[in-house]
């Protein structure tokens, strides 16, 4: 099932503390965002990529795309203040009625098989997310004190890609803006409209590079892959 990919790379990387957009940080000499883009570059089902970046970083990104021979980026659009705004900017640039896949540039280890699974699910249900069951005990905490231990049996950690029929996710983002909803993922907006979102089992290795520790683990993981562990 073919799809169009919107790749988000317009954050500031504040939690990484690198003083720059973490998309430019290297994992084994290749920038995070290039690792991510390669997953879609090498997927024949990907019809094209809309890359969402900060306007001020356009030249740097274009140089990286050329240096690493990324050819599927059809358009580059300016990001927004929040992730939600950046997604909206990307959605407005995509046309058609097919499946659109929204993915964090900060998740470089997505695999073609997982992409195919979530796209296939969205094609039949309209909206689908990758997720993995939570492994830790989750507690609500206030002022360094446990308020509640949450029943873990139905908790899943949601990832990206999230895939949608384009008209549905556009409608959901417009609805979210009409009610000033502030969400941290796109499926939340579909849920706010009372529509179902399918969950597709993902992979724990599809981590989001957020803090320095993630970069360390990413490098070790990639070394192991190269060794064939
Ligand atoms: N205004 C924003 C914020 C985030 N992102 C992208 O959304 C993905 C997930 O966001 P996150 O991991 O939070 O990245 P940052 O916002 O850069 O991180 P931080 O919150 O630590 O600043 C990243 O690929 C990031 O580049 C984006 O395109 N536009
Ligand atoms: C979309 C997401 O990756 C799903 O887990 C997550 O919500 C992004 O959160 P962030 O704070 O913008 O990284």
Image: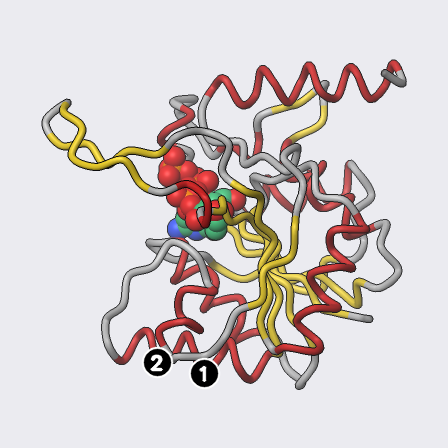
Task: Identify the residue under disc 2.
Answer: 175
Check the picture and name the quadrant holding the C terminus.
top right
Query: Which residue is painted at 69% across and 68% down in the image?
Result: 121
Quadrant hosting residue 51:
bottom right
Above or below, 25 relative to 92? above
Query: Which residue is painted at 54% across and 36% down in the image?
Result: 208
Look at the numbered disc 2 and give the secondary structure of its residue. helix
At label 2, counting other C-alpha atoms closer than 10 Å, the crowd grade (few under 14, some 14-19, many 20 or more) is: some
Seen in the image, is 161 located left or right of residue 65?
A: left
Colouring convention used in this rendered image of the protein? secondary structure
Seen in the image, is 179 located left or right of residue 31?
A: left
* x and y percentages locating residue 44 in the rendered image: 88, 60
Above or below, 221 relative to 156? above
Query: Which residue is painted at 74% across and 55% down in the image?
Result: 115
Query: Which residue is painted at 44% across and 73% down in the image?
Result: 190
- Please name whichever residue, 205 or 87, is drawn nearer the observer in this view of the structure: 205
**Spatial distance from mark 1 to mark 2, Cα to Cα?**
6 Å
- Please name whichever residue, 139 or 194, is drawn nearer the observer in this view of the structure: 139
Quadrant hosting residue 108:
top right
Determine whether label 1 and label 2 are within 8 Å by CB.
yes
Task: Identify the residue under disc 1.
Answer: 171
């Amino acid at each position: 099932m073919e799809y169009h990919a919107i790749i988000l790379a317009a954050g500031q990387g504040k939690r990484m503390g690198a003083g720059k957009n973490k998309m430019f940080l290297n994992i084994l000499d290749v920038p995070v965002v290039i690792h991510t883009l390669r997953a879609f570059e090498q997927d024949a089902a990907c019809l094209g990529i809309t890359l969402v970046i900060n306007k001020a970083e356009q030249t740097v990104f274009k140089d990286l795309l050329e240096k690493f021979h990324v050819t599927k980026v059809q358009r580059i659009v300016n990001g927004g203040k929040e992730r939600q705004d950046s997604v909206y900017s990307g959605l407005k640039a995509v046309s058609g009625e097919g499946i659109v896949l929204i993915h964090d540039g900060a998740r470089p280890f997505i695999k073609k098989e997982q992409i195919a699974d979530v796209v296939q699910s969205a094609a039949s249900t309209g909206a689908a997310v990758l997720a993995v069951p939570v492994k830790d005990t989750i507690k609500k905490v206030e002022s360094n004190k446990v308020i509640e231990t949450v029943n873990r049996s139905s908790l899943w950690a949601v990832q990206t890609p999230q895939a949608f029929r384009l008209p549905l996710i556009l409608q959901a983002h417009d609805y979210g803006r009409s009610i000033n909803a502030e969400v941290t993922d796109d499926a939340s907006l579909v849920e706010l409209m009372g529509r179902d979102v399918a969950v597709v089992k993902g992979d724990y290795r599809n981590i989001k590079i957020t803090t320095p520790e993630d970069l360390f683990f990413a490098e070790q993981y990639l070394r192991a892959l190269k060794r064939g562990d």
